[in-house]
């Protein structure tokens, strides 16, 4: 019965939309763009597509586990969880509401995009030294909004973040690096 099947799929979306990110529990994996799709595979099984964030982010196996727990709790088995690497995850997939939540949580959301967008195929070949990547604009302080911030460390509490400090209010904060 098609109607029943659709209900299960809707329910799966519902429970998965509230699965929090294991590292930043104020935002969900859907809001971060990690949860890509929940669909019926050709064999009728529910298939959940997730895309890892930064390669090697150790949170990924935790996320798959959390997804499985949520589906089990909602009695939605059988299902399968597939990881897809293409298209690669980028911080551009983080929703606006999630950026707000990150800021409220004390993490500066990524500014702009990653800055290493794929080059056009028509790019002429030149033999000059590779230009240094343009420094990204400093993230605004999530506490007071000041643009006057400095980087303390390339890596913050996790590899995905850098540690910054606000020069005005002196508060340190994590910056979710654009990627
Ligand atoms: Zn500040």
Image (cartoon, rainbow, N blue to C red):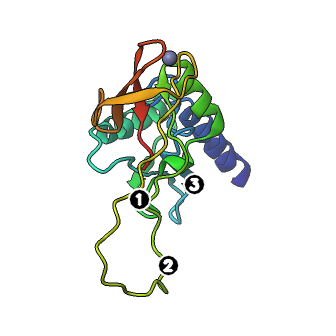
Query: Dots 1 and 3: beta carbons under 8 Å?
Result: no
Residue 149 location (% of width, % of height): 44, 27
Q: Mark 1: which secondary structure? A: loop
- What's the distance in space between the residues labelled 3 and 2, CA to CA? 33 Å
Which mark is nearer the camera, 2 or 1?
2
Q: Earlier in the sequence, mark 1 or mark 3?
A: 3
Which mark is nearer the camera, 3 or 2?
2
- What's the distance in space between the residues labelled 2 and 1, CA to CA? 24 Å
Q: Mark 3: which secondary structure? A: strand
The residue at 51%/23% (across/down) is 141
The residue at 55%/23% (across/down) is 146
Mark carried by residue 128: none
Mark carried by residue 120: 2
Mark carried by residue 84: 1
Residue 22 visible in rendering: no
Residue 150 location (% of width, % of height): 38, 29
Residue 150 visible in rendering: yes
* Nearer to us in this view, 13 or 128: 128
Q: Is residue 132 left or right of residue 141?
A: left
Label 2: few (<14), some (14–19) or many (≥20) C-alpha neighbours in 10 Å:
few
Q: Earlier in the sequence, mark 2 or mark 1?
A: 1
- What's the distance in space between the residues labelled 1 and 3, CA to CA? 14 Å
Mark carried by residue 39: 3
Residue 63 location (% of width, % of height): 38, 37
The quarter holding residue 95 reads: top right
Q: Is residue 82 left or right of residue 92?
A: left
Q: Mark 2: which secondary structure? A: loop
């Amino acid at each position: 019965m098609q109607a029943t099947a659709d209900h299960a799929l809707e329910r799966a979306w519902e429970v998965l939309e509230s699965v929090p990110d294991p590292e930043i529990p104020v935002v969900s994996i859907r809001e971060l763009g990690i949860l890509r799709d929940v669909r019926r595979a050709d064999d009728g099984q529910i298939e959940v597509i997730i895309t890892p964030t930064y390669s090697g982010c150790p949170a990924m196996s935790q996320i798959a586990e959390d997804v499985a727990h949520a589906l089990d709790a909602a009695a939605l088995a059988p299902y399968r969880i597939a990881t897809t690497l293409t298209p690669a995850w980028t911080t551009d997939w983080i929703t606006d509401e999630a950026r707000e939540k990150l800021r409220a949580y004390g993490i500066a959301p990524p500014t702009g995009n990653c800055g290493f967008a794929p080059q056009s195929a028509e790019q002429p070949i030149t033999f000059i030294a590779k230009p240094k990547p343009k420094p990204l604009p400093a993230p605004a302080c999530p506490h007071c909004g000041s643009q006057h911030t400095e980087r303390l460390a390339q890596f913050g509490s996790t590899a995905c973040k850098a540690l910054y400090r606000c020069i005005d209010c002196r508060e340190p904060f994590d910056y979710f690096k654009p990627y």
